[in-house]
Structure formats: structure tokens, C-alpha cells
Image (cartoon, helix red, strand yellow):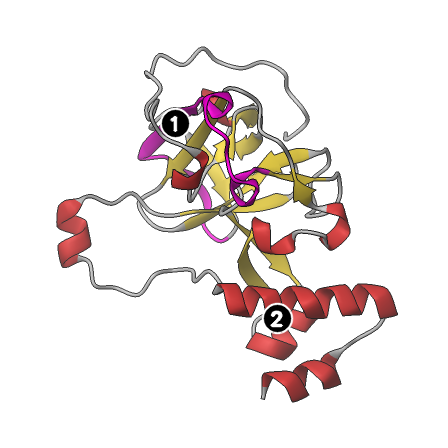
Amino acid sequence: MYAWNDKSWTNAHAALGHDATLSDVDHGMLAGSRVATAMGWRKVEAICEGDQVLTFDGGLQTVVAVRRQVIFAGETAAAIEDWPMLVPAGALGNREEMRIPARQAVLIESDTAEDVFGDPFALIPVASLEGFRGITPSRPADRIEIVTLHFAGDEIVFANTGALFYCPKATDILSDIFDKGEPSYSVLSQEQADLLVSFLELESETHGSVAPTCAQLAA
């Protein structure tokens, strides 16, 4: 069902955020990234409100809002820390090379994460993975379209046949005021992310568990 499908739909929604810069981007996928939907793999820019997208914990969920940003990165000198991250094929379970906004959180599974934080799954900004499995900043194209999918609740979606992207729930002023519930997912802080990545790199270098070291340093 989720075989590659090059067919995409023409989207009638106007792009938003023409005056945005890369430093304004906290979530989203670059146009061309594919997500798993009820109709197979589709480019994220072809997704509309009402479409169903496959999520990590909730199965198929309905998209309730789509945010689109067009950024003309060539008009300003973007700081390297804001560049999208180039993720080689296989680095995050993705079947092909992809580029991800620097502050977009991705879900990784690791025994080391469980040793340090008590949970094998960890949400981490992709920029924190710089250097891990060849992940590196990539100079942006002159024009970038970034699409963010929103659902009724926080969700994690499948992209590029394996990578897992965090999508925060749709919010507005009223929901921000009255919704005091705990978020479904929590992204690691910069300090926590750096700690975890250092352990992951050590684990990769030693080809074995670093659980004793993790337990000692995390205590």
C-alpha cells in the first residue's frame, strides 16, 4: 500500500509566510518529503485539510490544518545554524536522502535513550544530531517551501518511508488559554539532546552498550 507513488495533487491553498526566514521555522517538512496517508505515500505539499495521515501511535488521523511557508533564503544570508539538515539515506530510518528544518523534532528509538531517560523513544531536534551518521547542515536553496501538518492532538507521522516527524496539534488563542492538559509528547531540551547524542556516538564507535556509562553520568 505504501509503495512509492510519484503522483501528486495540485494544491489550491495559497502559500503563507513569504516574509518568514529560516530562523522562524520550528516545525515542518520541506516540500518533496513524502508522508504515509490513507492513499499511500504522498508529497507533503499535496496534503490538504481533511486528508488522513498515518501516525505512530494513533493510526490514521485527520489533518485539521496545514501551514505553508515560502522562504526566499537566497535574499538573506541565513546563519548556518538555521540551515536545513541533510540526512543521508538510512540515518533515521529514511529510505532516501532528505533535508529537514534544523529545529524540527524527530523520533528516535534507542536502548541508550531508555538507559538515560527511562524511555526508548526520544524526540530530538534534528540539528542536535549534526555529525551523527553523516547528518550535516546543508546550504538552503534560494526558494524553500515548508509545510507543517496539524492534527487535533500532537502526533508523530511517518515520512520518507521510515523517518518519524513530530507534528504539534493545531492551536489558536482560545485553546492556548483554556487547554491546560499535558502535551502528548515532549521534545528533549538542548542539554538533554546533546547528552543523548554523545552517548549514541559512543555506542556507535564501540559497537556495544554504553549503559554503565550512561547510568553514571545521568545520575
Quadrant placement of the N terminus: top right
Q: Which residues are magenta?
A: 57-84
Asked where in the image residue 129 lies, by quadrant, the reply is bottom right
Residue 119 marker: none
**Number of numbered discs present?**
2
Residue 69 marker: 1
Residue 75 drawn above or below residue 155: above
For the point 35% across and 42% down, which residue is it? 151
Left or right of 218 on screen, residue 51 = left
| Residue receiving disc 2 | 195
The reply to whether residue 160 is in sight is no
Tell me the distance, in whole angstroms, between the alpha carbons under discs 2 and 1. Answer: 32 Å
Comparing 157 with 133, the one in front is: 133
For the point 76% across and 51% down, which residue is it? 133
Which of marks 1 and 2 precedes in the sequence? 1
Q: Is residue 188 magenta?
A: no
Residue 203 drawn above or below residue 133: below
Q: Residue furthest front?
A: 77
Residue 77 drawn above or below residue 157: above
Disc 2 element: helix
Coordinates of residue 178 in the picture (x, y in percent) = 14, 57
Check disc 1: other Cα within 10 Å, few if <14, some if 14-19, many if 20+. many
